[in-house]
Image (cartoon, rainbow, N blue to C red):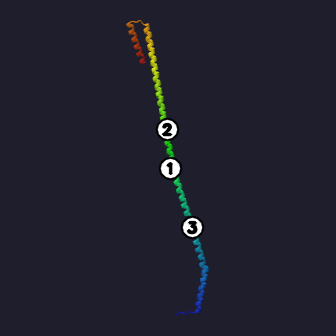
Amino acid sequence: MLKLDPLNMVFMVVNILVLYALMKKFLFKPLNRVLEERQALTDKVITDAKTAKEEAEKLKDQNEKLLKETEKKQGMILSEAREKASLEYERIVSEAGKKAEEITEDADRDAEKEHERMLEDARKDITDLVVDAGSRISLMKSDPDGDRALYDEFLESLDREENS
């Protein structure tokens, strides 16, 4: 069987302790240092990612706010443009109505002037005819045949003036 020698056991324990000390110094410390560096790097990457995510969320919020403001401004601009267009339409229609009224009034005035001119011309013609007839009557004798001839001549002159 196996013999347990106390001195051998002491050497084994000392060997194990030396081996542990050497492993701790040359294996575990560098390994722990590498693990700590990796942990620090990982923590830094996670912190940077969280910071970037927060900044991205802030930018997203700002963009959404800007988009809402832009949409609001766009709505206001469209509303103002529609209002201006409506006012311009009303102004143009009003001006067109005023011009139409002016044209109608001018036409009415021209028609009235033409009517008055025609009446004046007719009065002059009638006056001329009456004066002409009166002068012929006074020159002619008062005989019934002469009156008849004068009347016929008067009617013929009226027919000639109507035809011309």
Image point 60% across, 89% down: which residue? Answer: 11
Label 3 amino acid?
A: Thr
- Quadrant hosting residue 59: bottom right
Secondary structure at numbered mark 2: helix
Name the mark nearer the viewer: 3 or 1.
Answer: 1
Image point 45% across, 18% down: which residue? Answer: 123
Image point 60% across, 86% down: which residue? Answer: 15
Q: Position of residue 90 (x, y in %)?
A: 48, 40
Q: Position of residue 30 (x, y in %)?
A: 60, 76
Q: Are marks 3 and 2 in contact (CB under 8 Å)?
A: no
Q: Position of residue 141 (x, y in %)?
A: 41, 6
Q: Nearer the viewer, residue 34 or 78?
A: 78
User: Badge 1 is on which residue?
Assistant: 75
- Report the Cα–Cα distance between label 3 and label 1: 42 Å
Label 1 amino acid?
A: Gly
Compared across the picture, whether 40 is left or right of 135 comes to right
Label 2 amino acid?
A: Ile
Q: Nearer the viewer, residue 98 or 162?
A: 98
Mark closer to the chain start, 3 or 1: 3
Q: Quadrant of the C terminus?
A: top left
User: Badge 2 is on which residue?
Assistant: 92
Image point 39% across, 11% down: which residue? Answer: 151
- Report the Cα–Cα distance between label 3 and label 2: 66 Å
Q: Nearer the viewer, residue 34 or 71?
A: 71
Name the mark nearer the viewer: 3 or 2.
Answer: 2
User: Badge 3 is on which residue?
Assistant: 47
